[in-house]
Image (spheres, rainbow, N blue to C red):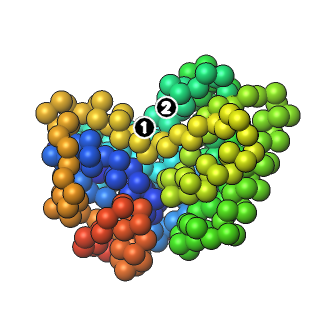
Amino acid sequence: MKIGVFDSGVGGLTVLRALLPRISNAEYLYLGDTARLPYGSKSQATIARYAVSSSQFLIDQGCEFLVIACNTASALALEEIRLTAKPHGIPVVGVIGPGAAAAAAETATRDALVIATSATVQSHAYAAACQLLGLRSIEKACPLLVPLVEEGWIGHSVTSEVVRIYLSELHQQAVDAGLQPDTIVLGCTHYPLLREVIETAVAELWPGQPPRVIDSAEATATEVERQLPSSSAGENAQAGHVRAQASFFATDSVTKFCQLGTRFLGQPVGEVKLVDLGG
Ligand code: DGL
């Protein structure tokens, strides 16, 4: 089984990282559309055009299953991607539904918080997915977090302060709306790298009962495993299999992809091929 994993950049490697231990006998093709990142500040039409051409690339490479490991593309272009994949009989899994379902599985209060890019928040895709599952939610755009992670400022005091400011605004919104959130969804592929910083801020703002952090990468990998034929899933991956099983493609600097990608994947990224998908 060839599984295509697509993100606007390296952030989707957090989803690949979650997939590898679950589905180890697949061949992965990962595409990071780094030349056109960030998607999160662009219009729906542009995001859909980029996401469709990226998905088409993976289909042309022979992928039989597509994982849209980008919250922004999943929120704004999942239908267009599905239409592209449908004639080939290729299933498509995005990250929004699994993220909302993971929050629904964890919450007792039925109130959830979501942090994401501006485009994802403006689409209200998470609010809609949460509502379908009977949850109330508040979404908060955190546009500075992607550039901070891209800069490698994971443990920097500036990043901690920015996270604290965003989350205290979100805390106030929750208080004003009378919500009692006990879950907070990381609705952007970059945010799992800030998990510790986010957990620290959440613990300060909600002393006693801090909302539990939900990583949509983990939830998405579980959903892919559920949708695959049982022969394709279930074996435990061994460390070192990544380079043997995954091919990496980027639309901009392969050097930068390798450096940043290693941090997102949690182990060295192998050879990265440069591809041109146009503008
Ligand atoms: N991959 C995007 C997401 O998960 C974040 C980066 C971007 O804005 O392109 O929403």
- As drawn, the residue found furthest toward the front would be 208
The residue under the point 18% across, 30% down is 230
Kind of residue at badge 2:
Ala
Asked if residue 142 is positioned above or below residue 230 in the image, the reply reads: below
Q: Quadrant of the N terminus?
A: top left
Q: Secondary structure at mark 2?
A: helix
Q: Position of residue 60 (x, y in %)?
A: 24, 55
The residue under the point 61% across, 39% down is 184
> Circles 2 and 1: CB distance less than 8 Å?
yes
Dot 1 corresponds to which residue? Answer: 219
Q: Earlier in the sequence, mark 2 or mark 1?
A: 2
Q: Position of residue 211 (x, y in %)?
A: 64, 36
From the viewer's perspective, tell me whether residue 195 is left or right of residue 239. Answer: right
Q: Position of residue 218 (x, y in %)?
A: 41, 42
Give the distance between the C-alpha atoms of the residues marked 2 and 1, in whole angstroms: 6 Å
Dot 2 corresponds to which residue? Answer: 102
Q: Secondary structure at mark 1?
A: helix
Asked if residue 269 is positioned above or below residue 84 in the image, the reply reads: below
188 and 198: which one is in front? 198
Kind of residue at badge 1:
Ala
The disc placed on residue 152 is none
From the viewer's perspective, tell me whether residue 115 is left or right of residue 70. Answer: right
Tell me, yes or no, if residue 122 can be seen here: no
Tell me, yes or no, if residue 152 can be seen here: yes
Give the quarter of the image for residue 112: top right
236 and 228: which one is in front? 236
52 and 272: which one is in front? 272
Q: Position of residue 270 (x, y in %)?
A: 25, 70
From the viewer's perspective, tell me whether residue 221 is left or right of residue 140. Answer: left
Give the quarter of the image for residue 180: top right
